[in-house]
Image: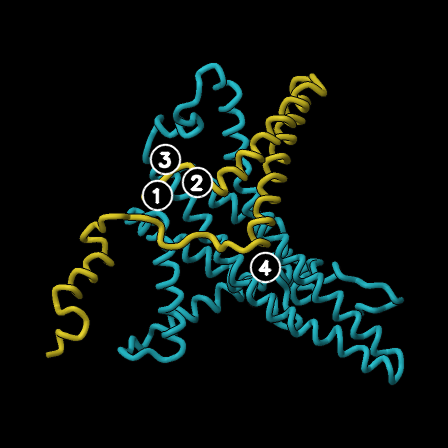
């Protein structure tokens, strides 16, 4: 019988329905993650820190320009930006939403 | 051109030039735009022409089209879940555009439009604005609770919320800088070693033997760049999916 090949007709029907999203799979976990190589992780962490720092500094400078309070907002948002950078790296290893799905 | 005056001109390849001389100059159409159009044309050709026959046993083109479709489809549904199917066309176009931009840039005489921060940042801003709008459209006011982590002590909130907002705003920056930096670094390395080949090769009989060393390195680098081209398009697409997941599921 042709149906005996891969678990029979029922199994194939179930697979097809799951793929189309008609049946909800029980554990909707992530099937793929980001590539994890030492270089990839290292570069990503660096980019995350620098980009958060840059965003913080830009916000600080813009606020200072607007309110004429140089350098106080710059200093404040410099610290905030570094904290956000550390937070980004933390999120890189511990995604915020626990189990995805 | 590169080795003129014994100086290595590694950044000249990123300069924008008007396409087709005076015609491009008149309408401000650079070779970067031309390569974007070429990428869109090749992708459309691959998908339309490749799927035209709809054979049960796919030929080469159809197999390539089906594989790329399946790859991105699994990526989006794997990250976002079933709701992600709505965003599949968006992520697919983004992935193919970045991938073909990276790949076309590896051809001789071609230009890599993904090596310009203006291009990658625009793409990242599209992603950023879309995820924000999707989040607000689905969750309404509740979306703003994204910036208030669960279980955080109340007195610390004035400190935590701005940090969360900066962290959220840094997404398009990191997304665009990653792609841009990878492409620039790869192409600069290729150019530098290619210049070494010309410089050492010009130094007589012995130099020709010496020049094989950087030449061999460049062969390896091209293979590595192919990997990076694919990997960066993949990372761009998967990070877009992760951001979409955050927007759809919030916590």
Q: Nearer the viewer, mark 3 or mark 2?
A: 2
Q: Is residue B57 left or right of residue B47?
A: left
Q: Which residue is mark 4?
A: B33
Q: Secondary structure at mark 3?
A: loop
Q: Nearer the viewer, mark 4 or mark 1?
A: 1
**Residue A60 seen by the camera:** yes
- Quadrant location of the N terminus of chain B in the rendered image: bottom right
C-beta proximity under 8 Å, tags 1 and 3: no
Q: Chain of mark 3?
A: B
Whether residue B202 is situated above or below residue B48 in the rendered picture: below
Q: Chain of mark 4?
A: B
- Marks 4 and 3 sit apart, C-alpha to C-alpha, by 37 Å
Residue under disc 4 on the same chain as residue under disc 3:
yes
**Residue B27 seen by the camera:** no
Near-viewer residue (A24 or B111) = A24
The hue used for chain B is cyan
- Marks 4 and 1 sit apart, C-alpha to C-alpha, by 39 Å
The hue used for chain A is yellow
Q: Which residue is mark 2?
A: A95
Circle 4 Cα neighbour tier, 10 Å, few/some/many (<14 / 14–19 / ≥20): some
Q: Which residue is mark 3?
A: B250
Q: Spot the residue most to the front.
A: A38
- Marks 1 and 3 sit apart, C-alpha to C-alpha, by 11 Å
Q: Position of residue A10 (x, y in %)?
A: 12, 64
Q: Which residue is mark 1?
A: A100
C-beta proximity under 8 Å, tags 4 and 1: no
Q: Chain of mark 2?
A: A
C-beta proximity under 8 Å, tags 1 and 2: yes
């Amino acid at each position: 019988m042709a149906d005996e090949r891969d678990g029979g007709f029922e199994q194939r029907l179930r697979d097809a329905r799951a793929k189309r999203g008609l049946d909800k799979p029980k554990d909707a976990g992530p099937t793929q993650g980001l590539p994890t190589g030492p270089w990839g992780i290292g570069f990503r962490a660096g980019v995350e820190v620098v980009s958060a720092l840059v965003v913080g500094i830009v916000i600080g400078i813009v606020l200072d320009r607007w309110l004429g309070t140089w350098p106080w907002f710059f200093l404040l948002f410099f610290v905030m930006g570094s904290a956000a950078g550390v937070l980004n790296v933390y999120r890189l290893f511990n995604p915020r939403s626990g189990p995805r799905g | 051109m590169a080795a003129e005056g014994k100086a290595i001109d590694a950044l000249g390849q990123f300069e924008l030039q008007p396409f087709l001389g005076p015609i491009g100059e008149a309408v401000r159409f650079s070779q970067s735009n031309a390569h974007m159009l070429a990428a869109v044309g090749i992708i459309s050709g691959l998908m339309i022409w490749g799927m035209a026959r709809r054979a049960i046993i796919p030929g080469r083109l159809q197999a390539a089209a089906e594989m790329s479709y399946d790859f991105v489809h699994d990526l989006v549904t794997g990250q976002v879940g079933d709701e992600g199917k709505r965003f599949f066309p968006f992520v697919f176009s983004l992935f193919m555009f970045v991938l073909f931009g990276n790949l076309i840039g590896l051809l001789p005489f071609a230009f890599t439009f993904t090596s310009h921060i203006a291009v990658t940042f625009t793409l990242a801003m599209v992603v950023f604005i879309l995820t924000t709008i999707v989040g607000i459209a689905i969750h309404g006011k509740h979306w703003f609770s994204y910036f208030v982590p669960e279980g955080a002590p109340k007195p610390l909130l004035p400190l935590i919320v701005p940090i969360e907002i900066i962290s959220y705003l840094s997404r398009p920056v990191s997304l665009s800088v990653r792609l841009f930096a990878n492409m620039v670094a790869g192409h600069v390395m290729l150019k530098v070693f290619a210049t070494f080949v010309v410089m050492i090769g010009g130094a007589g009989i012995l130099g020709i033997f010496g020049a094989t060393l950087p030449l061999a390195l460049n062969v390896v680098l091209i293979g590595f760049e192919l990997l990076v081209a694919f990997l960066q398009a993949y990372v761009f697409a998967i990070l877009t999916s992760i951001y979409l997941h955050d927007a759809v599921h919030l916590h």
